[in-house]
């Protein structure tokens, strides 16, 4: 069975309710043992799977795209919504038949779901042999060896130091053009609906020198775009003395040098004007004008910001513990538009039907969308997660049918806005980076412009990794269509 990474360029409708990366890669270096990895959820999980592949490769494993040929099967999981966890449980059932005929196969659950459920996965899912949280991947070879000897293993220790900075990721399903670089781990924001602080631990920032070195190595190998990843990249803060942000704040006067996110962006951008730089995700309370001006200074830092609002109503935002209100968010959007211009892409996350949300408060989310005019959004109805502050403090009191209706209204609004925003691009010349084949035709290629919009062009004379100047000729709510004007223009 072959799986492909699911495109997430624009998500609306039912697709937006379940984002899965299914990770496969085929590599044969003559090693006798093979691993198969599937990843579900966010970009951070996909990046983590590349770290896992690297650790296992150093311990004698090749990777395979056929789980039936694998000695070890890993599911790198997500706990952000109940549906995501149910998807993993259903997937484990598919492995049952293979395991019956191949009892020596080791099956492991990794990531956020492993961290949240821990030993319960060994008890409930009888075919699970290994359960490993996001900070314990270095222990995987030992746990797998133990499982081969009949000992089931769990390591869900959450570290205040682990960043995997010394591990060179194995690029899974790589197009050879774009790559993720994890710059920090964990989250100190205690949003009441979110399990991430409990499954990924406290924030800690990775050594900037290792980040720049990884980006330089990717560029030297022909990659032309990197995305800097973190649960909240604007919280990135590192010093030689201390890289845990929570403690660094208390020792500001005692450290010699502090590298913040704006500084890091500049360091990566300076590698080459031919290396595009993106980042995700920003938190509205933390994104600074310094970051925006750094983006403006460097043409190769893409003019696109994922700025999750979650709700357009201040009371609901307070219940969510987002630590900003409607006015603060709109002021940040105003700064983005003033510094980076109207063409800067802005996307969002939105939750319909959070606890006690009224119809009037739901309307505030719709009016927020009209004011910001998001290019695209990731949209969900509220799914209560055990152990979160919301689950402990608030009743999940909005009926499912109301949640679904409100979500449908948000999706409809976003489809309208996406089309409206895309129409503004028609007739304009834009620079895109070719990164893959169009879904609909091998005669067409796709790239993305600076604002993170997919542009479809004729494949004639083009190859992956080309920069192309295009004129936008048409659009749909999800896609732009362009005419090639120039291939690999000089980029200063």
Image (cartoon, grey):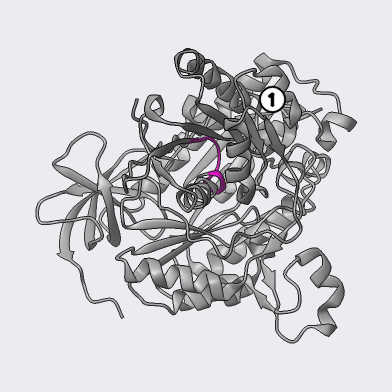
Q: Position of residue 324 (x, y in %)?
A: 77, 53
Seen at 53% across and 61% down, the residue is: 167
- Left or right relative to 355: residue 162: left
Residue indicated by mark 1: 121
Seen at 18% across and 44% down, the residue is: 444
Q: Position of residue 330 (x, y in %)?
A: 66, 55
Query: Looking at the image, which residue sits at the far bottom?
Result: 256
- Left or right relative to 324: residue 457: left
In the rendered image, residue 40 lying in the magenta stretch gets the answer yes
Q: Position of residue 255 (x, y in %)?
A: 78, 83
In the rendered image, residue 162 lying in the magenta stretch gets the answer no
Q: Which residues are magenta?
A: 38-45
Q: Is residue 385 visible?
A: no
In the displayed structure, would residue 135 be above or below residue 112? below
Look at the image and tell me in which quarter the C terminus lies: bottom left
Q: Is residue 188 visible?
A: yes
Q: Nearer the viewer, residue 97 or 276?
A: 97
Look at the image and tell me in which quarter the N terminus lies: top left
């Amino acid at each position: 069975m072959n799986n492909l990474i699911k495109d997430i360029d624009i998500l609306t409708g039912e697709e937006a309710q379940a984002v899965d990366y299914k990770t496969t890669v085929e590599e044969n270096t003559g090693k006798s043992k093979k691993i198969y990895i599937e990843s579900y959820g966010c970009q951070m999980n996909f990046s983590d799977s590349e770290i896992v592949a690297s650790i296992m490769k150093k311990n004698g494993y090749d990777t395979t795209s056929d789980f039936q040929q694998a000695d070890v099967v890993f599911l790198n999981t997500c706990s952000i919504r109940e549906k995501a966890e149910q998807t993993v449980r259903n997937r484990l059932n598919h492995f049952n038949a293979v395991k019956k005929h191949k009892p020596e196969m080791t099956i492991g659950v990794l990531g956020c779901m492993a961290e949240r459920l821990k030993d319960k996965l060994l008890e409930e899912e009888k075919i699970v042999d290994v359960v490993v949280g996001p900070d314990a991947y270095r222990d995987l070879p030992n746990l797998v060896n133990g499982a081969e000897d009949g000992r089931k293993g769990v390591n869900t220790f959450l570290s205040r130091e682990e960043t995997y900075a010394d591990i060179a990721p194995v690029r899974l399903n790589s197009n050879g053009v774009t790559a993720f670089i994890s710059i920090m781990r964990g989250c100190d924001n205690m949003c009441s609906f979110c399990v991430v602080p409990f499954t990924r631990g406290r924030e800690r920032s990775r050594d900037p020198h290792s980040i720049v070195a990884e980006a330089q190595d990717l560029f030297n190998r022909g990659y032309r775009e990197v995305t800097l990843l973190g649960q909240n990249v604007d919280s990135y803060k590192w010093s030689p003395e201390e890289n845990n942000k929570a403690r660094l704040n208390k020792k500001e006067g005692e450290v010699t040098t502090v590298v913040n996110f704006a500084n890091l962006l500049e360091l990566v951008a300076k590698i080459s004007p031919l290396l595009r730089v993106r980042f995700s995700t920003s938190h509205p309370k933390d994104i600074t004008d310094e970051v925006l001006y750094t983006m403006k200074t460097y043409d190769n830092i893409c003019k696109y910001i994922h700025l999750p609002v979650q709700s357009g109503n201040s009371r609901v935002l307070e219940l969510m513990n987002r630590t900003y209100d409607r006015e603060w968010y709109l002021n940040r959007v105003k700064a983005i538009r003033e510094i980076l211009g109207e063409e800067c892409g802005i996307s969002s996350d939105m939750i319909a039907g959070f606890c006690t949300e009224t119809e009037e408060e739901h309307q505030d989310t719709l009016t927020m969308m009209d004011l910001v005019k998001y290019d695209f959004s990731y949209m969900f109805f509220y799914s209560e997660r055990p152990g979160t502050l919301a689950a402990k403090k608030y009743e999940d009191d909005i009926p499912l049918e109301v949640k679904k209706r409100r979500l449908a209204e948000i999706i409809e609004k976003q489809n309208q806005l996406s089309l409206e925003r895309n129409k503004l691009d028609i007739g304009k010349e834009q620079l895109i980076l070719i990164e893959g084949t169009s879904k609909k035709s091998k005669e067409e290629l796709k790239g993305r412009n600076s604002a993170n919009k997919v542009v479809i062009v004729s494949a004639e004379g083009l190859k992956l990794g080309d920069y192309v100047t295009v004129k936008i000729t048409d659009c749909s709510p999800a896609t732009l269509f362009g005419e090639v004007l120039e291939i690999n223009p000089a980029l200063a």
